[in-house]
Amino acid sequence: MARGKIQNKKKKPTECASYYFVAHVDSTGEVTPLLLTDPEYRKAQKRAERNPEDVPEDFIVFSQQHRKQ
């Protein structure tokens, strides 16, 4: 779940100033952190809206404390 943007701390001239932080958790609990630009976030959001049958009903919302060490 994206809750807001995080700042790009070492922004280069051609990079975005901020990103949405999203994490993917696979079936083993492995967490993959993702940084999405505005267009990438909107594209993924629209894909989920167009394909609601593919969005798991039991998706997980977690915080950093649930991260596998």
Image (spheres, grey):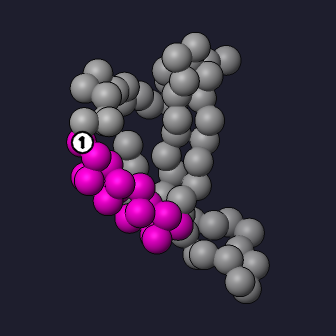
Give x and y (percent) for residue 39. Answer: 46, 71
Q: Find residue 63 and report its image quarter.
A: top left
In the picture of the structure, the residue carrying the numbered disc 1 is 52
Q: Does residue 12 appear in this view?
A: yes
Residue occupying image coordinates x 51% and y 51%: 21
As rendered, which of 11 and 27 lies closer to the eye?
A: 27
Give x and y (percent) for residue 54. Answer: 32, 36
25 sits left or right of 55 in the view = right
25 sits left or right of 13 in the view = left
Residue occupying image coordinates x 39% and y 49%: 2
* As drawn, 9 above or below 45: below
Q: Give the magenta part as a residue range.
A: 37-52
Q: Give the structural element (helix, strand or loop) at label 1.
A: helix
Q: Quadrant of the N terminus?
A: top left
Main SS of the magenta part reads helix
* As drawn, 17 above or below 48: below
